[in-house]
Image (cartoon, helix red, strand yellow):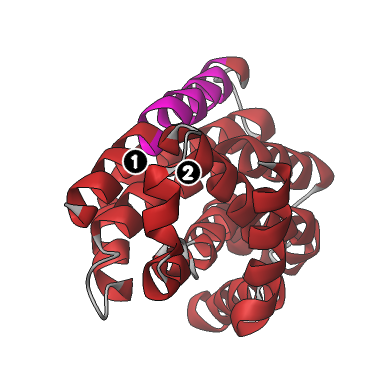
Amino acid sequence: MIALFLRDLRLSIRAGGGALIGILFFLTIVTVIPFAVGPDLALLSRIGPAIVWIGALLAALLGLDRLFQAERDDGSLDLMLMQETPLVLTVLTKCAAHWTATSLPLVIASPLLGLFMNMNETAIGATMLTLLVGSPAITFIGAVGAAVAVALPRGGLLVSVLILPLTIPVLIFGVSATYAAVAGPSPFLPPFLILIALTLFFAVIGPAAAALALRNTAD
């Protein structure tokens, strides 16, 4: 599993620029918003956490369609299905490698983009913490869509269409926890704990559903 993790990590970084493409896409989304809403710094500060979360969500979708596509193309997916190691564990390892290569750099870059949105230190810290906790859920959800679309020649758009509705709860509680930490009077802990629960829930359901979809695709 360690060898698989390192292999997928290298492939994710090499394919299409990896983390750099995600950060550039993230940066593009966040920097375009001020041109649309105007130079109102108070408004930018108020909507900043939501914009950063939306940008991170869309950037995290990049490359999810290729999560199993390389194995499908070179035939190694059949070997994964036949090996003694449970397929769920293999999918979980690939999800961990994808999150490390694509979503973790977005979390690290979020404080800089928060400054672009005139967010204060509390808002930047809360946004970074909620992204760190909530972004793995997006990857686990995306693994299901990638497994469903792996047999399709152009499944990238289909993956996004399948994933986006399922990521709405993650987005809601991530933004809610950030606003609760900044503005109050709602406490920060309840939505943050729900966000953790969503990540743990999809960490169990996502790889299992993706493994089932991969087996059905192979059949």
87 and 53: which is toward the camera: 87
Q: Position of residue 24 (x, y in %)?
A: 66, 79
Q: Residue 4: within the magenta?
A: no
Q: Are marks 2 and 1 in contact (CB under 8 Å)?
A: yes
Instruction: Tell me which amino acid carries mark 2.
Output: Val
| Mark seen at residue 211 | 1
Q: Which residue is mark 2?
A: 91
Q: In the picture, which quadrant includes the N terminus?
A: top right
Query: Residue drawn 60% across and 26% down?
Result: 184
Magenta stretch bounds: 190-207
Query: Residue drawn 65% across and 56% down?
Result: 45
What secondary structure is the stretch in magenta mostly built from?
A: helix
Whether residue 154 sits left or right of residue 143 in the image: it is left
Q: Give the answer, above or below, for where 59 lies relative to 31.
A: above
Q: Position of residue 20 (x, y in %)?
A: 71, 77
Q: Position of residue 209 (x, y in %)?
A: 30, 37
Q: Is residue 137 visible?
A: no
Instruction: Tell me which amino acid carries mark 1.
Output: Ala
Assess disc 2: are there few (<14), some (14-19) or many (≥20) residues with their C-alpha within 10 Å of its C-alpha. many
Q: Residue 195: within the magenta?
A: yes
Assess disc 1: are there few (<14), some (14-19) or many (≥20) residues with their C-alpha within 10 Å of its C-alpha. many
